[in-house]
Image: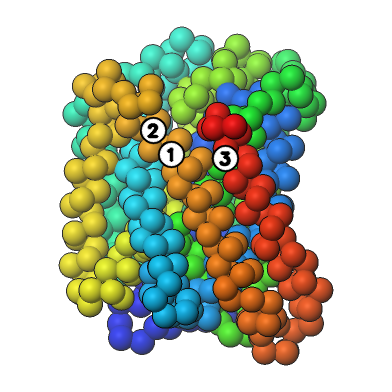
Amino acid sequence: HAATAAAGKTRDAFSSSFGVLAATLGSAVGLGNIWKFPYVTGANGGAGFLVIYLLATLLVGLPVMISEIMLGRKAKSDAVTTLRTLAPAGQPWWLIGAFGVVAAFLIMAFYTEVAAWVFAYVFKALRGDILSSSPAVTSAAFKGLISDPVQSLLWQWGVLLLIGGILLFGVAKGIEAVTKKLMPLLFVLLLVIGARSLTLPGAAQGLSFLFTPDWSKISGEVVLVAMGLAFFKLSIGMGTMITYGSYFRDDQNIPATTLRVMSADLFVSMLAGIAIFPAVFSFGFQPGAGPALLFITIPAVFASMPFGHVFMVLFFVLAAVAATGAMLSLLEVPVSVMVGRFGISRARATLLNLLLLGLIGSSCALSNSVLADVKLFGMTFFDLFDYLTSNVLLPLGGIFICLFVAWVWGKQKMMEALSNHGVLDNGKIVKGLHGLLKLVTPLLILLVMFKGLGLI
Ligand code: PHE
């Protein structure tokens, strides 16, 4: 896609408004929808969590996402340089970008491991040996994979090599084109799986878990996790959307595009939820199974449908494609900063990042085997990086983005940037947005963080 096409000297923009939408969606939609959304929703009580997640997406996610894309398009640069150019001289707002690089790294460390499981499952699905509707069997199969240090490491390195290959051989544009075509297929497949899941005996219980709130399960931490999911899902708070914004065309309507990406992203997550939760209750899985949820539940759905074997292969291939799009956008943050700030070549920056990731990422690959007992704050590396990025680093990044846009940049510049210099009538939107960014959104994030982390 255009982001990686910046390999050349000129910084080219996405060529059409559908291109912008598809590329931004390519970053947002990923394992967050099919793996993380179901597992955190399951672990945090279902429907009540979902309501809070929706609220967080609207009140926090949307304003921050619009802001990031706006800044990126204005400065047309990487995350660090963007803040450096747009901020008054001498003020350290570029630190938002620097922390974003750290967050991108920590996310990649565990994300590549989940992607590794997905790739491994493509092969397992091909062999057909995990097709079972017994929780004991599918759980054992998953456990066998993640507790094997050699397999976990090799699959992760395979993922890193693949990403490296895509970037180094400059085929990212081709990959984007493929992703664009395959994404609708993922929608359709999720619909098919959802239909099967909904017609399983006892499916209603899953639906009521997903849509009938039980408010007694809501706590400060649950609210924080819901907000963290909103950040993670929309790829915000760490510079990805700043970087992607830099490839937006000047005549693109930013708020409208953002709204579309957000809606499509929510739609995919809901489909994933509808595919998984009825099956959870029908077959007797535990909704709170954690990161394993997708991998142990979905084979059971396939086991109970005609051509399940074929559908399962297809599902994990499409999940792998979606994960790849998201990983490319994650890696784009450190790579573009290195190229933009230190002037090293894209190829070198990519290699350097992948090497570092091989090192740091292995701590996550081994979190369920040799490093299972190494815990910080009571969590394995995998869980820690997952928790820390969504619930601390991304929200912090979000707070500072809000403050920068509302207080330093100001309403006038927002108006120019979002109305495309008076071409679009976005006046009301800018007013509302500015109001949110000034106090409501940053205070809300701060409050939720403090309460969720038990600091107040
Ligand atoms: N939004 C992606 C997903 O849900 C993950 C992601 C987070 C990608 C942050 C880029 C930046 O899978």
Residue in the picture at 53% in, 49% down:
395
Secondary structure of residue under mark 1? helix
Few, some or many residues within 10 Å of mark 2 (<14, 14–19, 20+): some
Q: Any mark on residue 384, and which?
A: 2
Mark 2 close to ligand 1, CB under 8 Å:
no
Label 3, on which residue?
449
Residue 80: image quadrant is: bottom left
Secondary structure of residue under mark 3? helix
Number of marks drawn = 3
Side (left or right) of 160 relative to 254: left
Disc 3 marks a residue whose amino acid type is Met
* Residue 263 against residue 87 in the figure, above or below: above
Q: Whole-Å distance between the Cαs marked 1 and 2?
A: 6 Å
Q: Quadrant of the C terminus?
A: top right
Residue in the picture at 46% in, 25% down:
292
Q: Whole-Å distance between the Cαs marked 1 and 3?
A: 11 Å
Disc 2 marks a residue whose amino acid type is Leu
Q: Quadrant of the N terminus?
A: bottom left
Proximity of marks 1 and 2: CB atoms separated by less than 8 Å? yes
Residue 73 can be seen, yes or no: yes
Secondary structure of residue under mark 2? helix
Position in image of residue 229 (x %, y %) = 57, 42
Position in image of residue 345 (x %, y %) = 20, 74
Q: Whole-Å distance between the Cαs marked 2 and 3?
A: 16 Å
Position in image of residue 276 (x %, y %) = 61, 29
Side (left or right) of 136 relative to 160: right
Disc 1 marks a residue whose amino acid type is Leu
Residue in the picture at 40% in, 57% down:
100
* Residue 228 against residue 252 in the figure, above or below: above
